[in-house]
Every structure is written in C-alpha cells, then in structure tokens.
Amino acid sequence: MSVGEEVRTEQTRQQQSLGTAAARNLATTTKSVPQMQEISSRWLLRMLPWVDVQGGTYRVNRRLTYAVGDGRVTFVKTGDRVEVVPAELGELPALRSYEDEEVLSELASRCRQREIEAGQVITSFGSPADEVFLLAHGRIEKVGTGPYGSDESLGILADGAYFGDQALLDEDAIWEYTTRTLTACTVLVLPREAVAQVAERSETLSGHLRQQRSVPRQRTNKYGEKEIALASDHRGEPDIPHTFVDYEASPREYELSVAQTVLRIHSRVADLYNQPMNQTEQQIRLTVEALKERQEHELVNNRTFGLLHNCEYDQRIQPHDGVPTPDDLDELLSRRRGTKLLLAHPRAISAIGRELNKRGLVPETIDMAGNRIPTWRGVPIFPCNKIPVTEERTTSVIALRTGEEDQGVIGLRASGIPDEIEPSLSVRFMGINEQAIIKYLVTAYYSAAVLVPDALGVLENVEIGRWR
C-alpha cells in the first residue's frame, strides 16, 4: 500500500471517542503563576543589615579626618587622543579645592599624551620627581626595595590613577619607588615647569600653591584621623598629655532614595478574571519584584550612595595579573577586619574558580537558605549580577563588613510608611479614572551608608575572559 493510500484510509476511519482538543473545552487547566526572568537571587538585599531612618536622612558622624586628593581622574577620549577633564585636576592634592576653571583648563591643555609599551620603566627610584603622571588607560606596578635589597611590589595602578603629585609642591622631591608598565599604557604628563609658568601669570594659582606648601603637617593616625595624645609605660610623675576627640564639622548625610511606578489595572480585569489567581495580586507581585531588582542595582551602581562609587581610593586595589587570583582575594580581605561577605558577578565567580583550580585548590562551600555558596578564607562569595561587566570583559569584586556595631555598611529604609506591604515598600491606591482603570502607586525607599571607609573594599578591573 502506498503512502497516499494510507493517508486516505486514516481520514475515512470513523472516530470512536472524544478528541483531546474538544475535551479541553470542558476541563480545568492547571496554570502557573506569571513567571519573570528578571528575578535574581538578590543576595545584597538579603544580607545587608537594614536600619530604620527617621526623617528620611541618616547622618554618619566620624572623627575628624585629614584627607586630600583621594579620588580618581577622569578623561575624555576622541579617537586616539586622550584629554583630562580640567575640573578633575582638582583631585591632585596640590590642587585640591582649587576651582578656577580657566586656569585648570590651561593646565589640562599642557598635559602631554604618551604611549608606553608593556614592560617599560617610567620612573626610577631616587631620580628627581619633576612630572605628574595621569594614567588614562593600562596597568602600572609600583616597585620598591625590600629590607634585603630585593624588589617588592607596592601596589598596582590602573585607569584614573595618578602619581608624582608631590612634584607640584616640592622642588626637591625624588621618586621613592620605581614604576613600570604591566600592559601598554596611555598616560598624560604634566611637567612641574608648565605648572610654574601658569602660576607666574595666575595670582590665584600661585597663592593656592603657597598656601598648600605652608599648611602644617597634622598629627594623624594611619587612618588619617586626628591623633589622640596618650601616655603609656611612664614612671614617676611626668606631665600627662591633654587631648580631646575632634569630630568632622560637616558629616555626611545620606538621604533615602526612592523608586516608584504607577501600576494600572482595568476594573473589568480586576472584577471578572480573578480565578484561580487574583489578577491584582499578581500584577502587584511582579511590579514589586521589578522594583526590588532596581533597588539592588541602585545600591551597587548609584553615583551618590552606590557601593562601587562610595569606596575610598585607598580601599580600591588592582589584580596583579588581571585575573582574580587567590593572592588578590587575600589582599582584598587584608584591607579590613571582619569581612562578612564578598559580592561578585557570576562570571567573576567562575573566573575565581578557574584560578583556584589552576593551583589545585577547592573552595569550601556553606549552606545559605538552601544554596551552596563558595567561600574564600571562610568569607562567602555571593553572586550579584548588578555588578557591571565592561566591554573589555572586566568587572569588580566587592568586600563588605556589615552592621552598625561593627562600623560597617548598612542599608537604610523607612519602616511604617502608609499602605506598607513590606518594610519601606508601599502600594497605595490612587483611584479610578474615567476609563475605569484602577491605579496603584508602588514605592520603595532605600539607601546605603558606609560608616567608616575600610568597611568597603573593591577589587577592580578583574579580567573574566582569560582562560589560560
């Protein structure tokens, strides 16, 4: 029998029972609740200790700290030409708080671009320091002399860093370390002579530099805080030093940020289509999930209070070889006491795992809410897909000490707001318009505060695309 004859025979065969297509019209379908791909684990929101804020503002009082020039320099790239943003020269300690835009623009125009190949020495220990270097792109290692004459690494510099700034205030300054490139680098060089020429024509600049040279060196501890005079191991009746603890005159205040949206539901949908699931509840549930995702994104990336932008410069470190090695993680943990958790993009966690495998190391894991979380030195490494990955396939690893009692990082919220469904999250009925559409205002208030600088650290420019 041919294929065509078999088909005709099947079509003419009489149906003996009810088909499944017709039967479904009388059946109750088993349904899932609406699914949403955007939902992530949101470990940051779950692990961050939350503090209720009254009045919408949280003030962080600290001891008086003397710190200048602790930021990064920003550049503008046009083709292969790189220029420093004039106002960013104010990050240099010698030009801190100097605001004459015209003079800063002239100083920026006197910066000379230099391309340096990998493995080249830029400055040598003991040689005169008469230039300021602004690193636009690349990685540079600072090398000093160890106690037994061997070279030792003093740190890695990356995009936005500067060095040699002491040359602007001290004509007799010398290089106290050697710098050499680890990758091909683009740097801008500002000679001291160029700054002196501009200062000759600008009274404001010359006066500012004179003032900076005359500022007495303050007695501080290693954290930059005003020193508390103490006496110990004394005998007899010596004079006991007098002291007091000074506070910052203008402490930082964190205002609660807000994320909002207006949810609209037609009254016909809310009235008629509520079985077996309540349409209004499901619409609110998915909207709240999206709002929480935005909240975690802001806690990581917001320029005002986000973790990546509020980390102090001396708490930012660079990986020695680009990839996140165990040595880099140890360096990150060593910058603070009692690190409670690490946050990394899932791809960065994979890169960490590859580096551990290369050394034959197997990270321990701990159980957190039914999830196996990898650890390093007992500190859990939580995935956070809100940490950005650049086009160059680099990202960051964030280290946190948390809690008010430990002077760590805390989350800020406002519990007890009207129509609250969760702490600091409300769904407020806004009425029904002429088109019979019901409106709800969904609002979340939040922020984060770093109580002391060493509570937060970042391992920057972590390469996640190297497999060998």
Image (cartoon, rainbow, N blue to C red):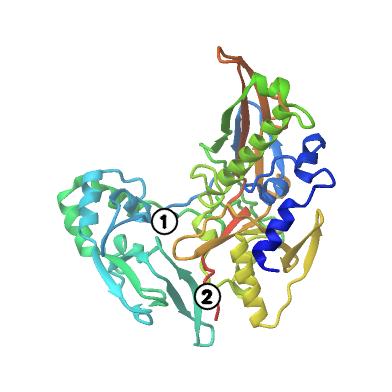
Nearest the camera: 265 or 422?
Answer: 265
Label 2 crowd bin: few (<14), some (14–19), many (20+), radius 10 Å:
few
Q: Name the kind of residue labelled 2 in the image.
A: Arg
Position of residue 74 measured from the top left corner of the image (x, y, whole percent): 36, 55
Position of residue 348 measured from the top left corner of the image (x, y, whole percent): 59, 65
Image quadrant assignment for residue 49: top right
Q: Which mark is residue 466?
A: 2
Nearest the camera: 251 or 331?
Answer: 331
Q: Is residue 396 above or below residue 36?
A: below
Q: Is residue 213 left or right of residue 408?
A: left
Q: Is the C terminus in the top left, top right, bottom left or bottom right quadrant?
A: bottom right
Q: Is residue 113 left or right of residue 33?
A: left
CA gap, disc 2 to disc 1? 27 Å
Q: Which mark is residue 393?
A: none
Q: Is residue 149 left or right of residue 95?
A: right
Position of residue 57 measured from the top left corner of the image (x, y, whole percent): 59, 31
Nearest the camera: 365 or 331?
Answer: 365
Q: Which mark is residue 72?
A: 1
First along the sequence among labels 2 and 1: 1
Whether residue 357 appears in this view of the structure is yes
Q: Name the kind of residue labelled 1 in the image.
A: Arg
Which marked residue is nearer to the observer: mark 2 or mark 1?
A: 2
